[in-house]
C-alpha cells in the first residue's frame, strides 16, 4: 500500500492540469466574493472572473510544446489541449463580457452565475486534455452539471425552467450511453486509457471481430454526438437554446461544443484508430444528415435564437466533415473551425443581448425590422457575423469551411464536400433573411431600450476582430492547429 501511494504521488504532476486548477481556484474565490458582496452588485465579480481567465490563458499558452503528462497518464497538457483551452477561454471571456448588464436587466444579478461559467470551462479543459475515458467522463460531468444550472438560471421564467429540465434529462440519458460504451470497452481491453485501448486491439483480435467492442464504439459515439448536437441526437438543442439565458446560449454553442469535439477527436483518433474506416463511414452519413436537418429546419424559424440553434446543428455537421476526412488538414480544420465559430456565433448572440427587451422579447425577425438603420454599429456587426456564418470571404467562416472541405477533397470524399458546399448555399437564405429585415423593412420601434454598455460592446468588437483576423490571415492559426495534432 505504501508503494502504491508513493507511486501515485510521484505521478501526480500538477503542471498537466494547471490551467484548469487555476480556474477552479478562481471559481471558488468568486463564490466567496459573492457571499460578501452587496446584494445585486455583480460587476466586480465579472471582472474578477475575467482576470482569472486571462491569467489562465497565459498559463495555458505557456504550456505550448510542454507535453506535460500527469496522474498515471490519464491527463496530458499537449498542444492539442492547449489550442482547445484557448478556444474555451475566449468563449468564456466573451460570455462574461456580455452577461453583467444582461442579468441585471433580467433581474437575476447572481454572482454564482460567473463561478459556474468558470467551472464549466474547467470541465471543458479536462475533456480536451483527458487521455483516459474516465478523465474525459469526469470533465464532461463537471461541464454538464454546471450548464444544467446555467440553462435554468432564470427560475421564475417558464422557458428557462423548461430549458434546464430538458437539458438535464436528455443530457443524463446521453451520458448513460457514453458510460455504457466506456464499460464495454473496458470489459474488452481491461483498460480505460486511450493508448492502452489502441494497443490492446493492435496486439490482439480486430475490433470488428468483437461485438462488444463494436457496441462500445457505437455507444461512445452516441454520447459525443449528443453533446455536439448532431442529428438525430439534436432534439434538445432548439428548446434549450431558445429558453436558456442568451449569453449562456452563446456559450453552449461554442465552448462546450468545442470540448465535445476535442474529446471526440482524441478518443476516436487514438483509441479507435483500428476502426477508422468504419467510423469515418458512419460520420460521413451523420455529417450529411446533420447539415441537411440543421439548414432545412432553420429556414422556417422566425425566432432568431431558435434559428441560430438550428444553424449550430448545421455547423456541427460541417465540422464532422473534417472528422470523416480523418487527415491532417481535416482534423486541424476542426480546431480552426471551432475557434472561428466561437467568434462569429458569440458575436451574433452578443448583438441579440443588446437588441432584446426584458424578458427576452423582440428577438424575432419582425422585432429586427429596421434595426440596421436605428442602430448602425450593431447592424453592421450583425451583418459581419452573419456573413461569416454563411462562409463569405474574407471572414473566419469562409477560411474554416475552406479547410474542412479541403480535407474532405484530400480524402477523396468529393461528394461529401459538394454536399457541404450546397448546404452552405442553402444557409444563405435564412441568414440573408435577417439582413433583409434589418435593412429593407420599415422599423416598427425606435429601439430606444438598446443601451451600448462598455462590456457588451467590447465583446462585439473582440468578436469582429477575431472574425476578420482569422478570415484575412488564417495561415498562422492554421499552422498552430496543425502543430496541435497528435
Image (cartoon, helix red, strand yellow):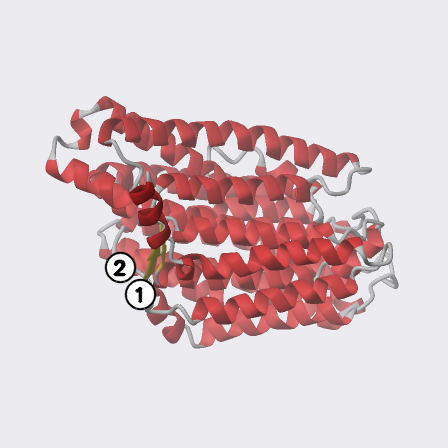
Looking at marks 2 and 1 on the same chain, the residue that comes earlier in the sequence is marked by 2
For residue 417, side relative to residue 337 (left or right): left
Residue receiving disc 2: 328
Q: Position of residue 235 (x, y in %)?
A: 55, 32
Left or right: 382, with 77 as reference point: right
Q: Secondary structure at mark 1?
A: helix
407 left or right of 335 in image:
left
Provide residue 65's location: percent of width, then percent of height. 32, 69
* Contact flag, marks 2 and 1 (Cβ < 8 Å): yes
Viewer-nearest residue: 265 or 50? 50
Q: Is residue 189 visible?
A: yes
Residue 170: percent from left, percent from top: 56, 30
Instruction: Relative to 123, say whether 190 is above or below.
Output: above
- Residue bearing mark 1: 482
Residue at image x 45%, y 46%? 260
Where, quadrant-wise, is the C terminus in this rendering?
A: bottom left
- Return the x and y of residue 345 as percentages of the image width and height: 58, 58
* Circle 1 crowding by C-alpha within 10 Å: few under 14, some 14–19, many from 20: many
In the rendered image, which quarter is residue 221 located in? top left
Q: Quadrant of the N terminus?
A: top left
- Residue occupying the point 55% across, 64% down: 90
Q: Which element type, helix, strand or loop, lies under badge 2?
A: helix
Amino acid at each position: 500500500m505504501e508503494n502504491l501511494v508513493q507511486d501515485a504521488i510521484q505521478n501526480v504532476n500538477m503542471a498537466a492540469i494547471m490551467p484548469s486548477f487555476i480556474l477552479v481556484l478562481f471559481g471558488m474565490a468568486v463564490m466567496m466574493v459573492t457571499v460578501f458582496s452587496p446584494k445585486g452588485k455583480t460587476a466586480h465579480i465579472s471582472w474578477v472572473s475575467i482576470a482569472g481567465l486571462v491569467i489562465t490563458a497565459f498559463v495555458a499558452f505557456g504550456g505550448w510544446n510542454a507535453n506535460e503528462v500527469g496522474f498515471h497518464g490519464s491527463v496530458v497538457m499537449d498542444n492539442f489541449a492547449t489550442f482547445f483551452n484557448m478556444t474555451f477561454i475566449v468563449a468564456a471571456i466573451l460570455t462574461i463580457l456580455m452577461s453583467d448588464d444582461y442579468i441585471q436587466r433580467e433581474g437575476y444579478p447572481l454572482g454564482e452565475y460567473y463561478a459556474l461559467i468558470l467551472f464549466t470551462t474547467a470541465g471543458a479543459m479536462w475533456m480536451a486534455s483527458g487521455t483516459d475515458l474516465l478523465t474525459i467522463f469526469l470533465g464532461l460531468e463537471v461541464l454538464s452539471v454546471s450548464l444544467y444550472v446555467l440553462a435554468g438560471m432564470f427560475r421564475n421564467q417558464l422557458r428557462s425552467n423548461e430549458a434546464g429540465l430538458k437539458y438535464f434529462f436528455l443530457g443524463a440519458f446521453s451520458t448513460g450511453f457514453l458510460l455504457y460504451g466506456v464499460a464495454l470497452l473496458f470489459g474488452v481491453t481491461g483498460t480505460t486509457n486511450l493508448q492502452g485501448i489502441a494497443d490492446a486491439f493492435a496486439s490482439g483480435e480486430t475490433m470488428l471481430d468483437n461485438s462488444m467492442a463494436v457496441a462500445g464504439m457505437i455507444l461512445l459515439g452516441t454520447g459525443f454526438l449528443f453533446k455536439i448536437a448532431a442529428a438525430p441526437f439534436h432534439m434538445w438543442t432548439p428548446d434549450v437554446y431558445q429558453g436558456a439565458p442568451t449569453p449562456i446560449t452563446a456559450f453552449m454553442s461554442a465552448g462546450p461544443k468545442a470540448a465535445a469535439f476535442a474529446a471526440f477527436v482524441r478518443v476516436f483518433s487514438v483509441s479507435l484508430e483500428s476502426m477508422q474506416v468504419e467510423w469515418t463511414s458512419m460520420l460521413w452519413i451523420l455529417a450529411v444528415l446533420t447539415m441537411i436537418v440543421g439548414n432545412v429546419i432553420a429556414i422556417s424559424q422566425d425566432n432568431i435564437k431558435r434559428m441560430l440553434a438550428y444553424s449550430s446543428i448545421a455547423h456541427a455537421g460541417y465540422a464532422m466533415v473534417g472528422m470523416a476526412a480523418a487527415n491532417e488538414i481535416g482534423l486541424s480544420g476542426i480546431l480552426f473551425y471551432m475557434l472561428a465559430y466561437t467568434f462569429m456565433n458569440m458575436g451574433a448572440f452578443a448583438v441579440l443581448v443588446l437588441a432584446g427587451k426584458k424578458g427576452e422579447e423582440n428577438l424575432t425577425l419582425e422585432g429586427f425590422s429596421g434595426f440596421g438603420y436605428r442602430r448602425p454599429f450593431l447592424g453592421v456587426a450583425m451583418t459581419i457575423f452573419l456573413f461569416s456564418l454563411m462562409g463569405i470571404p474574407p471572414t473566419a467562416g469562409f477560411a474554416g469551411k475552406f479547410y474542412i472541405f479541403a480535407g474532405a477533397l484530400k480524402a477523396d470524399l468529393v461528394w461529401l464536400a459538394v454536399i457541404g458546399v450546397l448546404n452552405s448555399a442553402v444557409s444563405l437564405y435564412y441568414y440573408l433573411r435577417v439582413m433583409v429585415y434589418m435593412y429593407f423593412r420599415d422599423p416598427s420601434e425606435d429601439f430606444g431600450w438598446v443601451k451600448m454598455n462598455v462590456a457588451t460592446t467590447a465583446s462585439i468588437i473582440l468578436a469582429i476582430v477575431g472574425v476578420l483576423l482569422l478570415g484575412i490571415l488564417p495561415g498562422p492559426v492554421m499552422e498552430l492547429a496543425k502543430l496541435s495534432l497528435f
